[in-house]
Amino acid sequence: MNDINTVEIAGLALFFIALFGLIARRDIMKSILSLMIMEIGIILYFLGANFRPGMVPPIGDITNKAVADPIPQALVITIIVIGVATTAVTLSMYISMFHRYGTWDWKKARNNRLKDG
């Protein structure tokens, strides 16, 4: 069984710290930042899980060498693109909600929405 390396530990730590920030905070902007940090933790974990010293890219003459798997790298690029799109959508929703309800607190926005409806 392979040992867990420090990059994987850092990725898991970032993920769970961001999960705590997502659960514990009522501020919408802090929730969005927690989601972004959670994404960075996932990316670090994927990159750390695939890393082994001495691996080479699968290009050219690769006989008798350990070859790096390109699939996790492709997944990381996909995660980054999805994360940017998710952040853009959540920030635009945050701006429209702030203009409508005048607050950045989840509970105050909910109470204001219940008063309007």
Image (cartoon, grey):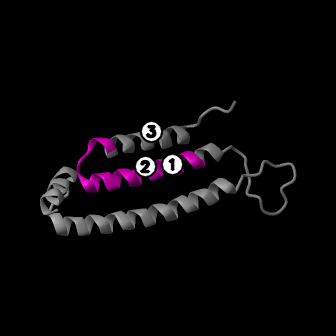
SS assignment at label 2: helix
Residue 33: image x %, image y %? 34, 54
SS assignment at label 1: helix
Q: Is residue 4 magenta?
A: no
At a point 39% along the width and 52% down the height, the residue shown is 35
Between 112 and 63, which is closer to the camera in this rendering?
A: 112
At a point 39% along the width and 63% down the height, the residue shown is 87
Front disc: 3 or 2: 2
Could you say which disc has been placed on residue 13 in the image?
3
Position of 85 compared to 3: left or right?
A: left
- Of label 3 and label 1, which has the lower sequence position? 3
Q: Amino acid at mark 1?
A: Ile
Q: Quadrant of the C terminus?
A: bottom left
What is the quadrant of residue 53 in the picture?
top right
At a point 53% along the width and 48% down the height, the residue shown is 44
Secondary structure that dominates the magenta span: helix
Q: Is residue 39 magenta?
A: yes
Between 66 and 87, which is closer to the camera in this rendering?
A: 87
Q: Quadrant of the N terminus?
A: top right
Q: Which residue is mark 2?
A: 38
- Of label 3 and label 2, which has the lower sequence position? 3
Q: Residue furthest front?
A: 117
Position of 23 compared to 59: left or right?
A: left
Question: For the residues marked 3 and 2, what is the alpha-carbon distance in whole angstroms?
Answer: 9 Å
- The magenta region covers 23-47
Q: Amino acid at mark 2?
A: Met
Question: For the residues marked 2 and 1, what is the alpha-carbon distance in whole angstroms?
Answer: 6 Å
Q: Mark 2 and 1 residues: CB-CB less than 8 Å, in contact?
A: yes
Q: Residues within 10 Å of mark 3 (few under 14, many from 20)?
A: some
Q: Which residue is mark 1?
A: 42
What is the quadrant of residue 57 in the picture?
bottom right
